[in-house]
Image (cartoon, rainbow, N blue to C red):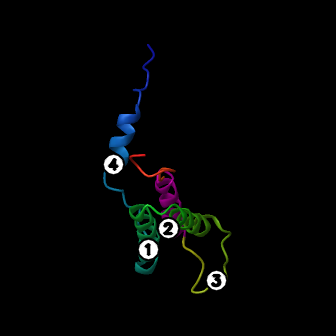
Amino acid sequence: MSAEAPSLGPQAWARHLAGPAPQPSTAGLTAAEAARVQRYRDQLAAALQRRDRGALRGAKQQVLDAAFRPCDPHAEPGPDSPALRRALRDLCWRMAALLLPRRPLGD
C-alpha cells in the first residue's frame, strides 16, 4: 500500500511560476520593516521585468546579505527583529526561482 507522490512535470512548474508572485509573510513586522521587505521585492521584480541579469544577481545578493548576515545588536536603528529575518528568509526561498535565460528568447 504505497502511495506515490504525483509527478510534477515542466508544465506544472511553468504554471506555478507564471502565477502572481506570493508576498513574503509580514506577520509581526513594523511598518518600516514591511517597507524594507517590499523594497527588496520591488528590486527583484524590476530587474526581472527589465531582463537585467546583473541587476537580478545584485538584488538577490542584497536579500541574501540582509537575511543571513550576523545580527549586530548595536546596529542603527536597532537589531533586525526575528519577524524581519523570517520575512527576508522567506523572500530568499521565493527568489530562488527567479532566473533569466542566458540568451534572449527566440534565438
Dot 4 surroundings within 10 Å: few (below 14), some, or many (20 or more)? few
Instruction: Identify which amino acid the numbered label 4 is placed on.
Output: Ala
Q: Residue under circle 3? A: 75
Query: Which of disc 4 and disc 3 is earlier in sequence?
Result: 4
Dot 1 surroundings within 10 Å: few (below 14), some, or many (20 or more)? few
Q: Is residue 41 magenta?
A: no
Query: Which of disc 2 and disc 3 is earlier in sequence?
Result: 3
Residue 45 appears at what percent x and percent y?
40, 64
Query: Which of disc 1 and disc 2 is earlier in sequence?
Result: 1
Is residue 107 positioned above or below 76 on the image?
above
Measuring 44% from the left and 52% from the top, which residue is drawn there? 104
Q: Residue under circle 1? A: 39
Instruction: Identify which amino acid the numbered label 2 is placed on.
Output: Ala
- Nearest the viewer among 54 and 18 is 54
- Nearest the viewer among 103 and 2 is 103
Q: Residue under circle 4? A: 18
Is label 1 or label 4 in front? 4
Residue 98 appears at what percent x and percent y?
46, 54
| Farthest residue, direction top | 1
Dot 2 surroundings within 10 Å: few (below 14), some, or many (20 or more)? some
Q: Which quadrant of the rendered structure holds the N terminus?
A: top left
Is label 3 or label 4 in front? 4
Q: Residue under circle 2? A: 83
Query: Which of disc 4 and disc 2 is earlier in sequence?
Result: 4
Measuring 60% from the left and 86% from the top, which residue is drawn there? 76
